[in-house]
Image: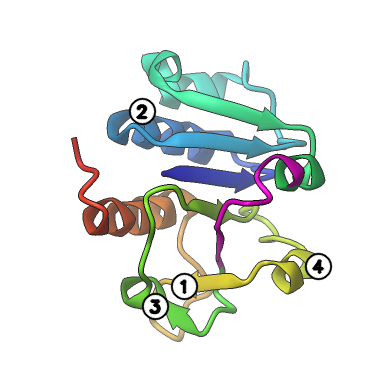
Amino acid sequence: MHIVLYKPDIPQNTAAIIRLAACFDLKIHLIEPCGFNLSDERFKRVVMDYIGLSKIIRHEDFETFLKRYKKSRIILMTTKAKKFYHNFKFKKNDMLLFGRESAGVPENLHKIIKYKIKIPMNKKTRSLNVAISVAIVASEALRQNKLFK
């Protein structure tokens, strides 16, 4: 299972996702540019020593990522989706794509990515924290595929 972060811009969220990935043996893909440096103190404070237990793959941009994983199934998490994550059938090598905290993913990505899902929320709210979203969706994907270790 793969977690893909599109140009993450909050170091603490990315660090929390990397810790989660280390705990559940998930691969992390960072689509550059990140809005911070991995030596950022806020990042290091949250990630602690989990970065050494993580499988992190960095990609220069989305096009480079897409070229390398063109045969993979990419699932975009977006509040604009119609289908809910709990009604989606995950596969064990899915690439779960999460957008920037500040802006999501650009419209052109929405157009080229076939699979889009969302987490049901109170209609009065805009979005969940990206680290919480990753935890919710990854947990369901791992459960469906019996990948908990």
User: Do the residues bearing badges 3 and 1 touch, measured as CB atoms within 8 Å?
Assistant: no
The residue to which callout 1 is attached is 118
Find residue 96 and report its horizontal and vertical position in percent: 50, 54
Marks 4 and 2, how far apart at CA: 31 Å
Give amino acid for label 1: Lys
Which circle marks residue 121 in the picture?
Answer: 3
Depth order, front residue of 64/35 = 64
Marks 1 and 4, how far apart at CA: 18 Å
In primary-sequence order, the first of circles 1 and 4 is: 4
Q: Residue at x 38, y 78 (%)?
A: 120
**Quadrant (top left/top right/bottom left/bottom right) for the C terminus:** top left
The residue range painted magenta reads 67-77
Under circle 3, the secondary element is loop
Give amino acid for label 3: Met
Marks 3 and 2, how far apart at CA: 27 Å
Answer left or right for 105 relative to 88: right
Find residue 98 and report its horizontal and vertical position in percent: 56, 54
Under circle 4, the secondary element is helix
